Image: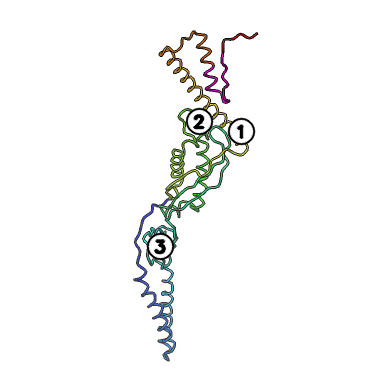
Amino acid sequence: MPEERVIQVTSGWGVLPVSLSMIGGGAVVFISALALNNTAIAFLLAPAAFLVALAGFVTLSGYFTLQPNEACVVSLFGPYLGTVKESGFYWVNPFTTRRKISLRSRNFEGTKLKVNDKTGNPIEIAAVTVWHVADAAKATFDVEDYDNYVRIQSETALRHLANSFAYDHGEVHEITLRSGMDEVSVALKSELQDRLTQAGVVVDEARLTHLAYAPEIAGVMLRRQQAEAIIAARQKIVHGAVSMVEMALKELDEKKIVTFDSHDKASLVSNLLIVLCSEAEAQPVINTGAKSV
């Protein structure tokens, strides 16, 4: 695995006049040699002029241009020579192999994957990855197709991430896919970076774009969430009602408004809890003390 090394190559503007002179001068000399009556001189000049013009045409294949945020990996008959990263118009040995690679940031939005979370529940998950090539030599020589490599490794990392976290309802203080989006994004980015370093790729950002239960259990999980919400609401209502009853008894006792025995307190507490916790509007019953016949 070659280490990337940045090289400086010859400016194309300095070599271009030489190439054009070789082509134009060779052509002129070749035509002039053919026009000579001296066969011996023509026999010597014509092939030489042809070769010079041909060499000029060959040098034309050594020119290339680079745009900003673009690199060119140069190799000669197999061995890696270096990488050109500065934008401009250049000339190199025409027999070298050159491969341009974009260094611009790219987005990869993966498809929805159906996987099991940490607790075994089937879920649907998708993510978007922002990445760019930082090491053009690794992207060229260490992997077959770095675009396809990023796609496959992104899906693999996302599957592993989904298996490592619960969708929801984890242990106490446990990070879940639903409640810990920031922590999950950091974990996904870290795992992607570990996988894509071999290809010379740097991950700029990775975030979940879709997260849901699989259709076959979505209805059951929705009822579960609704039940848990109802239980949580009931707990808060009961806690508030008990606090209010306690406050009412304390106020009545401190201000000596009325004196209760244990039976009266139990009755008052029962009535207050019914009024405060009931979903329907409470209907008060007034005890007049009259006896029914």
Distance Cα–Cα, label 3 vs label 1: 55 Å
Q: Are marks 1 and 2 in contact (CB under 8 Å)?
A: no
Please, is residue 128 above or below residue 224 in the view? Answer: below
Pick the front one: 30 or 195: 195
Q: Residue at position x 63%, y 9% from top?
A: 292
Looking at numbered disc 2 in the image, what kind of residue is underneath it?
Gly
Which residue type does callout 3 highlight?
Answer: Gln
Q: Nearer the viewer, residue 185 or 198?
A: 185
The x, y position of residue 184, in whole percent, is 46, 39
Q: Could you give the CA–CA distance between mark 1 and mark 2, rounded to whole angstroms?
A: 17 Å
Tag 2 secondary structure: loop
* 95 sits left or right of 271 in the view: left
Q: Mark 3–mark 2 contact, CB under 8 Å? A: no
Q: Upstream in the sequence, badge 3 or badge 1?
A: 3
Query: Is 128 rendered above or below residue 50?
Result: above
Q: Magenta residues, as a range?
A: 271-287
Q: Give me the disc on residue 220.
A: 1
Q: Which residue is mark 2?
A: 170
Residue pictured at 57% horizontal, 10% vertical: 289
Residue denoted by label 3: 67
In the rendered image of this protein, does residue 140 appear above or below residue 113?
below
Question: Residue 43: image x %, image y %?
Answer: 43, 85
